[in-house]
Image: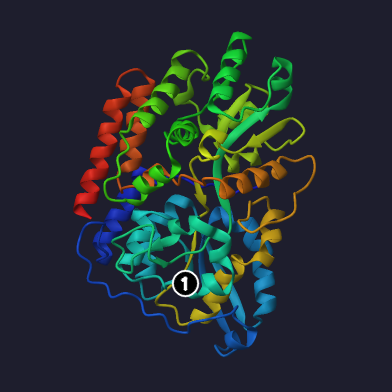
Amino acid sequence: MTIQRRMSQTAAAAVGVTAILAVTGCTAPGSDSSATPVAVTDEITAPVTAEQVAELGDITLSVWADQGEQDFMEVFVPTYEDMYPNVTVDIQYKSYNDLVATVINAMNSADAPDVTQGNQGWATDGALVKAGLIRPLDDAAAAYGYEAAAGDAISQLMWSDDGSQFGSGTIFGMSPDNQMVGIFYNKSRLDALGLEVPRTLSDLEAALKTAHDAGDTPLVLGNSDKASAMQTLSILQGALTDPAQTRGWILGEAGSDITVASNVEAVDTLARWVAEGYVSPGYDGTSPDDAAAAFAAGDGVFFIGGNWYAGTISDGETFGFSSGLDDGGNASSGSFGLNWHVGAKSDATMAGLAFVGLINAAETAPMLASVNRVPIHPVSAGEPGTIFPDLLTASEEQLSGDGALYWYDWATDTMFDTFTSGLQQVLAGRQSSADMLAAVQADWDTFQADR
C-alpha cells in the first residue's frame, strides 16, 4: 500500500532553493520582482478534447513528478495516452528534496518540463509564481470541476499574479488528493481498556491517562525528523484555536498572532503529556517510520500521524483512523498533496492542460483510490478489511468541517527550523511555550515586514 507523503520543507531543501533563486534571478519573498505575470493563452472552458491536442502533432510531454507518484502514474499515464494518442508522456521521478531543490531552476531553463509538481508555500510555488514560470489555471480548475470539489481549501493553491500574496487571487496549481494528520488507534487495546474512540480533547486526555495507568504506552511518537511533534501538536491546536485563525496566520493575513492563549495551552498540553509519561520514551531519537512500524506491530494505543502512514498501519481489522477532534471541527495539519503545474514556457500547453486537468477530474478519483490515495472527489468506501475506508471518512469529515490547518512551515521560508527547534526545547523542558511562540511570531513578523 503506497501513499504519497506530504513532507515539510527541510532546512537543507530551503538552502537549495535559496541558492537556485540566486542563480536563476528568481526573487525570494519580500524582494522586488521584475517578472511579468503570465498571460493565459489557449484558454479553455471545457475539458480538453483529443482534437484540440491532435493539433499539436505527435509530441512528447515532459513531466517532472515526485517519486511517490509512480504507482499512480503507472495507472494514469496509459489512460491519458489512450485519450490523446498523439502524445507520449516522458516522466522524470524525483525525490521530494531533489524536486523542490531543482524545480525552479528547471522551469527557468530552455528545456523546461511541460508539466511539473511543485509544493505549496513560499519556498517553491511562491518562487515559481513570482518568476512567471507557471501558467495560471483558473480556467482548468473551472473546466474540470476542480474548484467546486476543492471548496475553501482552494486557497492553498492561490497566489497574487506577482507572487507577493499567498492564499488568494489566481489558481496556479491543482492537486487531486487530501493528506491530513489524524489519530490512529488500536481497536483491541481500546476494548481492553474499556475506551471508545476519543472524539474530544478531554476524551483523548482521559484515554491517555487510562492507558498510562494500565501500564500501556499511550501515544507512540517518532520525532527524529523534527516534523512529527509539530504535526501531533496540530491535533491539540485544532481543538483549542479557531482553525480559520491558524490558516490566516499561515497564509500571512495582516495582524495574525500565534501567541494567543489557546496556542500556549496547546503547546503546554503536549509538554505535559511528555512530562507525565504519556509519550513513548526516546521519541526524538526515533524516526516516524520506525514509530509507525512499532505501532503496527502492536506497541501502544495511539499514534498521531499523517494518513500516509496507512501504508504501514494498514490492517483495518486491528486499527482505525479518525480525523482531528470534534472540538475544532476535525481540524489538524493537512493539505492537498503536491500540486501540479503547467509550465509557462511549454509549447504543448493544451496537452499539459489535458494532463493536469484529467489528473484532477472526478472520473480519475477511483484510479487514485486504487493506489490508496485519498481523492478530494467522492469515491466508494474502499476495500473492506483495510484501513482505507477510515481514511476516506476522515477526509470527508475534515473537508466538510473546519478543514485542514495547512502546515505551519508554509508561513515563512525559515519557519520549519524556528517552529520545530523551539517545540523540541519546550518538550524537553528547556524553554517555555510562551517564549517558543514568541520566537515563532518574530520569524513571521520579520518575513511579513519584508514581503
Instruction: Residue type at mark 1: give it.
Output: Asp
Residue 325, can we see it? no
Residue at the spot 64% in from the left edge and 40% down from the top edge: 310
**Badge 1: how crowded within 10 Å, few (<14), some, or many (20+)?**
many
Residue 3, can we see it? yes
Q: Which one is in front, 63 or 363? A: 363
Q: Quadrant of residue 29?
A: bottom left
The furthest residue to the right: 384
Q: At numbered mark 1, what does the secondary structure look like: helix, strand or loop?
A: helix
**Quick check: 271 left or right of 92?**
left
Q: Quadrant of residue 320?
A: top right
Residue at the spot 29% in from the left edge and 68% down from the top edge: 162
Colour style of the rendered protein structure: rainbow
Residue at the spot 48% in from the left edge and 59% down from the top edge: 154
Q: Residue 226: percent from the left, percent from the top?
A: 42, 33
Quadrant in which the C terminus is drawn: bottom left
Q: Residue 260: percent from the left, percent from the top?
A: 32, 33
Q: Which one is in front, 310 or 207? A: 207
Residue 116, placed above or below residue 200: below
Residue at the spot 53% in from the left edge and 19% down from the top edge: 280
Q: Residue 259: percent from the left, percent from the top?
A: 30, 33
Number of callouts in the render? Answer: 1
Q: Which residue is mark 1?
A: 138
Residue 47, placed above or below residue 279: below
Residue 227, placed above or below residue 38: above
Residue 59, placed above or below residue 24: below
Q: Residue 347: percent from the left, percent from the top?
A: 45, 82
